[in-house]
Image (spheres, rainbow, N blue to C red):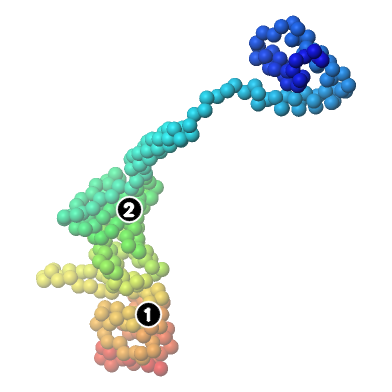
Amino acid sequence: MKSQKNKNTAAFVFKLWQREVSEEKISEKEHEILNQWTIRTEKDLDTMHMKESKERILSALELYFIKPVKNTPVYPLRKYFYTAAAAIILLLSVGGILTYQQFFKADSYTANSGNRKVYLADGSVVTLLKGAELTIDKSFPASTRIVNLKGDAIFSVAKSKTHPFIVHADGFSTKVLGTVFKISQSGNSKSVQLYEGKVAVSYGGTTVSYLKPNQKWTNFGIAHTAAVISLTQENNTGKQNAKLLSLSFNDVVFKEVAEVMQTNYKIKIMYPKESADKKITADFTGGTADENMEALAFILGLEVHKEDHTYTLKK
């Protein structure tokens, strides 16, 4: 080893070893030099130190045996990556949109210029009045037939004893099993008029109202108010008469309650100004004007006095 021209013996041996592991041919003399170097470096080491020494050497030399890789500019790679990613995202987006529209997005029908009939999968027919919009989920009809309505429409619902038909309107809902009815919505005023069958109307925490043919549910344009009115028609004149059957309020200020009662009972109510903004929750069903006014006075903690068609509430 002393005759070796290379001053750094370890570097020289490493070059030989590199050629060996890369499967380049080395001479017998070079093999002999490698063996001598191995014996000399390992003769004083025990088994444990031999193992640790080999691990350190291999770890240090590992980088030398990685095949050279041609460097590619980062920017083109990123460019291709971003282009491919954008293409994939675009395909997924388009596919997702088409899938959503085909299988998930609700169907929407609008009566733009005039009335429009919509025939539903269960056999029901909806006549949308001008400006109305009907939205139906792809799952329709399911165990419960649900649609959403904006504006006014007449429903002719296919009968089903096990699959109720529910119309969600603006703040209230109508549930039926098979019937013909009309829903009207104008600003704050909501109403359901029944022609055939039975319906149940739910609204604003008030008592659920059950309608029979020739009856109408309405809120009189006041939130959390519900009434059922019987509609009859005179044979001779064709005039329609309305009779209030039930009336309920859920946390409604008294001045609005008084307004509804005055209009529907054709009476006049006098009351203290401090009572105007008091909240009233009450259900007047089946009572006469006198009975309902007595109940109202009791709720307010006032007394009621009647003279002709005027009711005076006072302390």
Position of residue 314 measured from the top left corner of the image (x, y, whole percent): 37, 93
What percent of the width, then of the height, locates residue 261?
30, 80
* Residue 303 location, quadrant: bottom left
Q: Is residue 24 above or below residue 101?
A: above
Quadrant of residue 306 in the image? Answer: bottom left
State whether residue 106 is above or below residue 241: above
Q: Amino acid at mark 2?
A: Val
Q: Residue at x 40, y 79 (%)?
A: 280
- Mark 2 → mark 1, Cα distance in angstroms: 32 Å
Q: Is residue 69 above or below residue 178?
A: above
**Residue 151 placement, left or right of 203:** left
Which residue position is annotated with label 1? Answer: 253
Res 147 label = 2
Using the rendered image of the protein, determine whether residue 285 is visible from the camera's viewpoint.
Answer: no
Judged from the image, the secondary structure of the residue bearing numbered disc 1 is strand
Q: Is residue 302 visible?
A: yes
| Closer to the camera in the image, 216 or 9 | 9
The quadrant of the picture occupied by the N terminus is top right
Per the rendering, the mark at residue 220 is: none
